[in-house]
Image: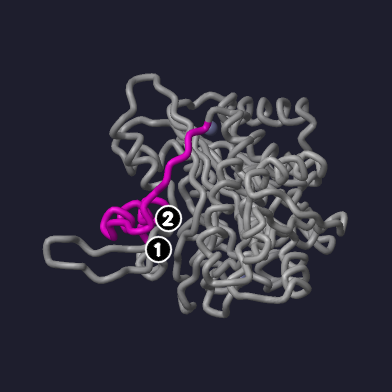
Amino acid sequence: MKSSIGIHQFMPDKVWKWKVLEQKVAHVLSLHDYQEIRLSVLQDYGVIHQGITALMQKEDVVQVTEGIINLSQPNNDLSLLTLRPEGTISVLHHTANIIQDKEIHRFYYLGPMFRKELGKTPSEFHQLGVELLGSDSVISENEVISLGIKICQSLGLKDVYLHLNSFGCQLCRPVFIEDMKKYLKDHESEICEGCFTRLYTNPFSDPSCKNEGCIQAISRGPQVMDYLCPKCRTNFARVKKIQANLAHQYKVNPRLNKNFAYYNETVFDFVVKHNGEDLVIGGGGRYDNLSQMITGKNIPAVGFYLNIDLIFETMERRELFIPLDRSFSVYIASQSDELEMMMMQVAQELHIHDIKTVLSTDKHSIEEDIALANKTGCDLLIVIRDDNVREGKLLMRNLTKEHQDYVGLHEITSEVLLARKALHKE
Ligand SMILES: [Zn+2]
Ligand SMILES: [Zn+2]
């Protein structure tokens, strides 16, 4: 459930779905040899601030500072703390400490992130981050892109497709940036102040402005795709060719922009349709320069994020969550205080055989016990009563077959196991 201030709380009716989603994601990632990293929710404010400043543009420092939720110092010996706003910075620092020459590392993390957008209340959102570190080859880009597609498909989002673009390299992008700035200056009167500042600071950003004048003027401006050097052009062609051969749907979107200015060469978005419109559920790209800025080392890097909240909502809307079969379970009731110990003993004995039990916490009539046991979805009901115990037996009712019988005290476990076998719930 999402509250108005962007804090997530998940109740049992949602949690089982989250577990299904997480298991499927983890399975695909393990097939591709990605290792999970569990990052601390508490991070050093200074490290995160420095990283995000590199992630965005130095000119956007106000926005950087605003975006991070800072907490106070717990004591004077510790630096300011923050809730983690993203994971790439920590993963890069970790990798820089352990990486050996020519080593490849494949990492992922999944969990809540916290940010505070300008003028908004703090929010919590869930993100999967996947990073392949140590390779600048086109195959590493294709591996990561294909992995994102595979994860979405495994979650049932069969219509997922790619938007692809290239932001060029150190050689070709400066010319584009210069031309873009010149174009913006020349057309300043046709573009709103917000768009102008945003694009002038970062020509790769998406101003997401609804103003028709801005949309028109920007669409007539220079596109980075027209500036690619021969190497970037060849690499981009290889990405398209391999994705096409893998039967992954894609379209080249020269207007695919990223608000983080750090990407180089291939950038991509994962898109599904919602109400006839494109819904971006994730994206990523190559970020060799960012990696260099943050770690001071040459660690080529490519990765992506998936917006797990959006994916969860999409899966719910499309009814893609299929409940797992209910496991076999036994409801145990007793009809006197003295027999409570026996209830616990029967339960313990069944747990040894991996059988789920539900204990009745109060004393009821047999009819009430049957109704309660049915409500919890149990398969069997065991009723422990003084008079029966004295005769060395217990009442066992098969709730599925609506049939009951007395079983000897020493035969309870074997009778329960037989019932489980008969119901094919082993
Ligand atoms: Zn280039
Ligand atoms: Zn605008």
The answer to whether residue 152 is left or right of residue 32 is right
Mark 2 residue element: loop
Kindly report the distance in space between the C-alpha atoms of the residues bearing marks 2 and 1.
7 Å
Q: How many marks?
A: 2
The answer to which of 405 and 128 lies nearer the viewer is: 405
Please tell me which residue is depicted at 38% across the width and 57% down the height of the picture. 41
Please tell me which residue is depicted at 45% across the width and 70% down the height of the picture. 116
The answer to whether residue 22 is left or right of residue 273 is left
Q: Is residue 398 visible?
A: yes
Label 2 CB sits under 8 Å from any ligand 2 atom: no
Residue 50 occupies quadrant: bottom left
Residue 224 rendering spot, x and y as whole percentages: 60, 44
* Residue where numbered disc 2 is placed: 56
* Residue where numbered disc 1 is placed: 60
Residue 53 occupies quadrant: bottom left
Mark 1 residue element: helix
